[in-house]
Amino acid sequence: MADYSVNFYEGANYALEPKYSDSSLSPYVGTKLPMGAFGMTTDPRTAHQLDAVSKKISTGAKVIEVTGISPDVLEYLPQTHMKEIARLKELTGVEITFHGPLVEPTGVTRDRWDEQQREQAERQIWSAVERSHDMDPNGNIIVTMHSSNGLPETETLIKEEGKEPRATSIAVIDERTGNFGALPKTGKNIWLSDKEYNPYDELKRLNKENWSRTLGNINLEAERASERINHVITLASGGKKGGEETGDKDAVFTAFNMAEKSPEEYEKFMKPFGEKRRLFDSMVNELSYSKRFAEEAYLGLQSSFNQAYGVAERKNDEETKEKLKRYRDKIAPITEKYKGDAVNLVKFADAVGEGVRLLNSIAPPEVFRPLKEFAIDKASSTFSNVAFKAYKEFAYDKPTNTAPIISIENPPVGMGLSKAADLKELVKESRDKFAKKAQQELGLSEQEAQEQAQKLIGVTWDVGHINMLRKYGYTKEDVVKETEKVAKYVKHVHLSDNFGLEHTELPMGMGNVPIKQHEEALKKEMGDKFKQIKQIIETGGWYQHFKTSPLAETFEAFGSPLYPMKMASYWNTTRGAGGNYSSGYGRILPDINFATYGAGFSSLPTELGGQVAGGRSRLAGTPTE
């Protein structure tokens, strides 16, 4: 006999659970979004995205996110496939979005920052954006890019119950070298009090201390040069050294100038001096050392001046900039004039010293800068440049604007620029830089430039990623506040669930992500625009472990309507309509089950063993009549 099995009753969910209630107050049910609002991602491990999109279309999904998160796999994706995906889109009516490659847009590598790395990342992102246009050449395809990928956590915030989040450490970068580290060491400032260290206070102290030490070293070099030169002048003007007359000053400085220019000329000049040659050599050497000290001080002064001016320019500190310009106009000509003139070495050294005193009068510049601030500056340059290129290529002077939208996603908490405030600041700076460039290079008005910036740069908000704040002590309410902060900038949503500790990517409703509150916060801020937001189901972990589609679980979590009319019944109510055998309610194996599910005899003709009219059931336990 062949093996076979019979499944009389597959069971159902427990109908009395709160999530199967139709009440809008149920904490488990979302905002009853229609099924068409959700999208699915393709398999990121394959370059055969055309096949992956076709398979997702067969599930009935109305929105599909093509994934090119792996840069090397994306390079295998033929451009013809992207154009075929566009044809599939037109034939089936689905909407296409794109997840770009995971690259680090700041230029920060494992141990330092490198501008060349940032430029390379910008080229990679632009290539992905440019290619994505072929999948939606008539619209504005949303291209999701992570705000960081490899950037360390820039600020560790701990949330204690009833208190505001407190920074326990911050990453800092030395802009001169590109190297970065963390502040502070944990503990208390016992010297002044038992107060906990504040990393930002520690950073101010570090910058002040570094500025003071730098200027002190420059000043020391300048003073040392001035003292030694004055000593030589005193000797050469009629003083004595070792009981001997030292000769005249003009001869000493002439000898020094010759020694600097040509050793042969110096030898000829010194020949007539006989026994005084030793004294002249000594004073010439003294002047040579002094000149080196003065030049070292001058180079340090230049470097410090440029650093102070750069910080003032970055902060738009016009008062400090004007002060530095006045000093430059006064001191620079003097130093340039005297730095190669032996007779005026003292004036040169004194001018350097005056410059040090002026720099000491301004606020210490940020040699060490918070890595978060620095990273936002560099990442915003990358994203604004890419958005500007997209606008020029696909919108400016074109009949219609088909430029892809750069939507910046928050990575899992624990990586850099993952919180709402970080993303908000990053988008604002990216938009400002885009608008400024559009006005300067394309002649757009300020209003038009800002409108295009707002259209083309926004946020992809991943509710699963932000939920990982819970491992730092954040509550459900704290996590929802993150959505409230960034809601104004959201253009796209990624859905995955977890328990706040690991990036597990479960379907919604299977972890503790407060999806209903997230959705309500977005809807409150966005109004009718909320309906245009596409919500992409990202459940790679679920596929990996359970090998099933997450659609039913997602629809259930949101309480989505079963029918296009967007009214009852809903997925959360119908999935719990039945009961299982061990539920404890009703008769076990009632006759109606067999009649309904086709496993009984009552519906068969009597010739084939069906129930005789008026007779007892064949399953009643009596012999066959």
Image (spheres, helix red, strand yellow):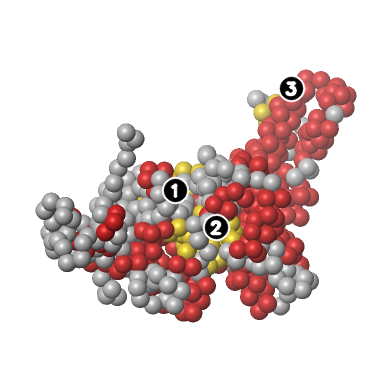
Distance in Å between CA atoms under marks 2 and 3: 94 Å
Q: Residues within 10 Å of mark 2 (few under 14, many from 20)?
A: some
Distance in Å between CA atoms under marks 1 and 2: 18 Å
Mark 1 or mark 2, whichever is nearer to me? 2
Left or right of 290 on screen, residue 146: left
Sequence-first disc among 1 and 2: 2
Q: Which residue is mark 2?
A: 57
Q: Which residue is mark 1?
A: 540
Mark 2 or mark 3, whichever is nearer to me? 2
Residue in the picture at 38% in, 43% down: 545
Q: For the residue labelled by badge 2, is the local secondary structure a helix, a strand or a loop?
A: helix
Q: Residues within 10 Å of mark 3 (few under 14, many from 20)?
A: few
Q: Is residue 138 above or below residue 175?
A: below
Q: Nearer the viewer, residue 263 or 517?
A: 517
- Identify the amino acid type marked 1: Gly
Q: Which mark is residue 278?
A: 3
Residue 327: percent from left, percent from top: 67, 60
Sequence-first disc among 1 and 3: 3
